[in-house]
Image (cartoon, grey):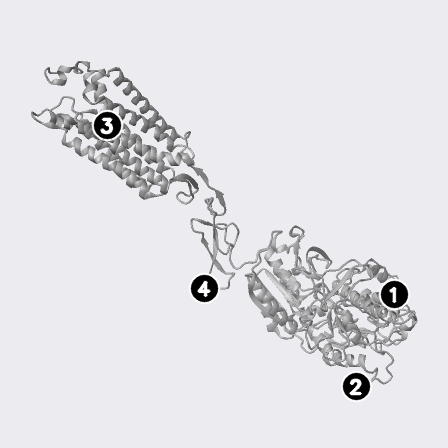
Amino acid sequence: MYLKPEQSWGVEDDWTFHPIFLATADAEAEVLDLCLSFRYFLWEQLSKRAGCSEGLRDTQSGMGLALAVTDPWLDDVTHLCIVFKNFQHALAFMFAIRDISEDSKLLPNVTLGFHLYDNQFDSMIIYKDTLDVLFTQQSTLPNYQCNMKKEVLSVLGGLTVENSIQMSTILSIYQVPQIAYSAYQTRMSGKAHLPSFYQMAPKEITLHMGIVQLLLHFQWTWIGLIVSDDNDGESFVEMLTPRLAQSDICVAFLERSLAMNQHALLDDRKTYSKIYFLLRTTDANVIVVSGDAHSLETLVMVLDANEFHIKAQIGKVWIIPPQWDFTNTFNQDGFSTQTLHGALSFSVHTYSVPTFRDFLQTLRPDKSPMQFFSVFWQAAFYCRVLNESFQFCSYCQICRGDEKLGRLPTSRFEMDMTGESYNIYNAVYAVAHTLHAIQLSRQRRTLDRDKFVNMNVHPWQFHSILKSAHFNNGVGHEVLFENGELSSGYDIINWVTFPNQSVLKSQVGEISSNQEFFIHADKIVWNSKFKKILPSSRCVKPCHLGHSKTVKEGKPVCCYDCSQCPGDMISDQMDADHCVKCPEDRYPNKNQSQCIPKTINFLKYAEPLGIALIFFAVFFAVVTVLVIQTFLKNWNTPVVKANNRNITCILLSSILLCYFSSLLFFGKPGKVSCLLRQTAFSIIFSVAISSVLAKTIIVILAFLATEPGNKMRKWLGQKVANSIVLSCSLIQVCICLAWLLTTPPFPDVDMLSQVGNIILKCNEGSLSMFYSVLGYMGFLAIVSFTVAFLARKLPDTFNEAKFITFSMLVFCSVWISFVPTYLSTMGKNVVVVEVFAILVSNTGLLSCIFLPKCYIILLRSNLNTKEILRGKTMP
C-alpha cells in the first residue's frame, strides 16, 4: 500500500498508467460501457433513429468498447450509447477521497491516491489489471515488483459475481482486501477460499426475504422468473426458489437470458421470440428479474421492440433487482420504456449526502485531470471539448463551459447518490477508518505521532478491523460490518415513467437488516394496463371465506380447488389452508366465515312456552285447591266419607304439590334447584300413586269384608291405608337419598346438542338412579292399575276402582311415551317434555278420580245420600 505524503487530494498526473491505492478492476466503475448492437428487427430502427446510412458496427476506443456509427459526412466514429449511471460510481469515489483528504481528524498528514481501471468486459483484462495493480507497472509478472514504489492496500470493485471471483482468486493469495460495492455479491462472502472478500451491500437473504414478503403482501403467488444465464442468475434461483416454495409461491416459468458481453452477443432470433412468447402468453402478471445491466438487455430489447412495432405495452408488474437500472440501458435513442411503468425495485438503503450535489456542480471537463470525465461530458451534453484526444462528436458544437449536470434528465444522470454509489462512498470510508484504527493502535506505542506516515502498513493488517468495522461516514450515518457483510436493508422503489422518457422514483417501502418489512401500497403507481386497481397474479381465483384450499394432484401448490368447510368449522381468511373449529362457546355463521357467540338457553319463566306451562300448572293447582275446599266443605257427606277421607286429603295434597314441584324446572339451573327438582317430584308423585294404591286396596278389602264370615273386616282400619302410603313412599325416599349421597344432580352446560345454543341444564349425575326413580313410580302405577282394573266391576255405588283405572291408564300412557321422547329430545326441550309429562299425568289423576265426585257434590247433590250409598233408593 502506498500513502501519498502530499497534501493535495487529487489524482496523480499520470493516473492512467501508474499503479493505484484504491483500484477497481470493474468496468461498471469506469467511464465507458458496452452498448451492444441490435440484430434483426432492431437494426433498421436504430439506424434510422441515429441517422446512420451505413448501419452499425462495433469499435474500440482508447478507453473501452462502445457502440458507434459511421458518419456519412465526416467519416468519423461517433459514440452512440453510453450508460451514464456508471459515471456516478467514479464520481462518488472521487468525492469520498476528497472529503477524507479534507478531514484533518480522520487521517491527518495522509493523502489518499487512487486510480481507475477498465476491464473492457474481458476476463483476461481483469486478471491482467489485477496483477498489474499488485506487482509491476509494466509487466504482469507475479511476485515481481520492479520500480514499485506504492503498495496497494485495498481494491474496490467487482460488480458481478464472476468479476469478483476472478479478482479474489488473486487478491486473496496476497491478502489484499477486496470490497465489492454491488448489491448482489453476498453468496461469495464467508467463503473459506476467499478470506479477503468484503461485501459493501446488505445480506443476500435480506433481498430474498424482501421479495417474498412483497409477493405475500399483495398475494402474488403465481410469478415468472427471468434471470441471467450465469453464476449470478443461478445463485439467485437456488436461494430464492426454496423460500418461494416455503411461502406457497409458485414459479409459472423460468427463463435464463444469456449474458450480454463482447463474447456472447445475442444475435439469435429464437431468444427474442421465446421471451416475447412467454410474456405474451403467460397468465402470471408479476415478473421477477435478476441480473446485471448487461445480462437483462435482451429483455429491454424485447419490450422496446414490442412497443415500437405493436404500439402496446405488456401489462406486468416488474420486480427489479438492485443492480439493474433499466432507464440507463437506452437513454438517448428515443426508445420508450412504458412497459416498465409501475415497476418495483429494491435499492440499497441510502441516506442523503447533500454535499455530493455541490461537488457535482463544481465539476468542469477543462479542470479535471482525468480523461474519462471529458469523454463523459461530451457524451452527456453532445458537445466537443477542445484539445482532447478523444472527440465524441467532431461536428457537434464546442462545449460552452456553462453546462450543468443538474440540468440532465434523471434517466441520463442522477444528482443524488444511487445505492451503489453510496456503497462506494462507504467503502472508501471503511478503508480510511481502518487506517485510522491502525494509526491509533500504533500511536499508543510511540510518542512521535508523525512517525505514522513513515511506518509500513500492509494489506493483511486490514482484515481484523474490516470484519467488524463500525463507524460513521462523512455525513454522520452509521455503517456496521458483521462478519465482512454490511448490516443494512433495502428500500422499495416504485418507478413511474412518462412518454417523454422522464422517470420518477418514489420510495414506497423498506425491508430492514433484521427483515422487518413495511410498504405503503396506496402510494404505488401501477402499470396503466391494470387501470389503477391492485394487480392480481394467481394461478386460480382465491378461495372465499368459508372455504379451504384443496391441492390438485399433479398440479403446483398454487393451482388448487376450493372446498366448503364442514358444518362445524370455519375459515376466516381468503385462501385458508384448512378450516378450523370454533371454540365450544361459539359456532359458525351462515357463511362459515367467523365464529359467533352461542345463545345461552334454558327454560325461562318469561318465554312463551314457559308462560304457557306455568299457567297450566298454576291453573290446575288452583283447581286442586278448589277441589280440596269442596271436599272440606262436604267433609261429612256420604261421597267424601265413603272413599277414605284421610287418604283423599293426602292424594289431593300430593297432586297440589306436584303442580308446584314442576316450577322447579323453570329458570336458570342452580345447585339447589338441580338437587330438588327430580327428587321432590319423584317423592311427591310416589306419595300420590301410593295413595291411589291404598284407596284401591281399601275398596277391595271393603268388598271382601261384606261377605259373611270374612275376616277382612279387621283390615279396613285407617292404619292399613296409612301403612301402604308410608311404606311405598319410604322406598322412593330411600332411592332418592341414595342418589343424592352417591351421584347427586348438578348444574351443567351442554354446548353440543344444539347448534348456536349453550344449554344450561341439570346433569342427573347418574342416569341409572334417575331411571330407577322413574321405574319405581312406574312400578307403583302398574300395580295400582292392575289392582284397580281387577276391582272395576265390584258392585258398589261409590266404587272408585274404575276411575282409578282410567287415571292410571292415563298416567302409564304418559310416562311410557315420555321415555323415548325424553331420549330423543335435546336442549331445553328435555325439560319441557318432563314438565309436560308431570302436568298431564298429575292432571289425569285429578280429573279421573275427583271430577266425578265434585260433579256429584256440586251438581247432583241428590246422589250424595246414605240411601243411594246403601243402594236402597234408585238415583
- Does residue 734 appear left or right of residue 462 in this picture? left
Q: Quadrant of residue 787?
A: top left
* CA distance separating discs 1 and 4: 67 Å
Identified by mark 1, the residue type is: Arg
Eyeballing the image, is 587 above or below 432? above
Q: Which of 480/334 is in front? A: 480
**Residue 643 seen by the camera:** yes
First in sequence: mark 1 or mark 4?
1
In front: label 1 or label 4? 4
Eyeballing the image, is 460 above or below 782? below
Identified by mark 2, the residue type is: Leu
Q: Which residue is mark 1?
A: 364
For the C terminus, give its image quadrant: top left
Q: Quadrant of residue 40?
A: bottom right
- Report the disc number at residue 553: 4
Q: Which residue is mark 3?
A: 722
- Does residue 349 appear left or right of residue 395 in this picture? left
First in sequence: mark 1 or mark 2?
2
Identified by mark 4, the residue type is: Glu
For the N terminus, give its image quadrant: bottom right
* CA distance separating discs 4 and 2: 62 Å
* CA distance separating discs 1 and 2: 38 Å
**Residue 151 location in percent, x, y?**
84, 78
**Residue 803 location in percent, x, y?**
19, 27
**Residue 77 seen by the camera:** no
- Does residue 807 appear left or right of residue 550 in this picture? left
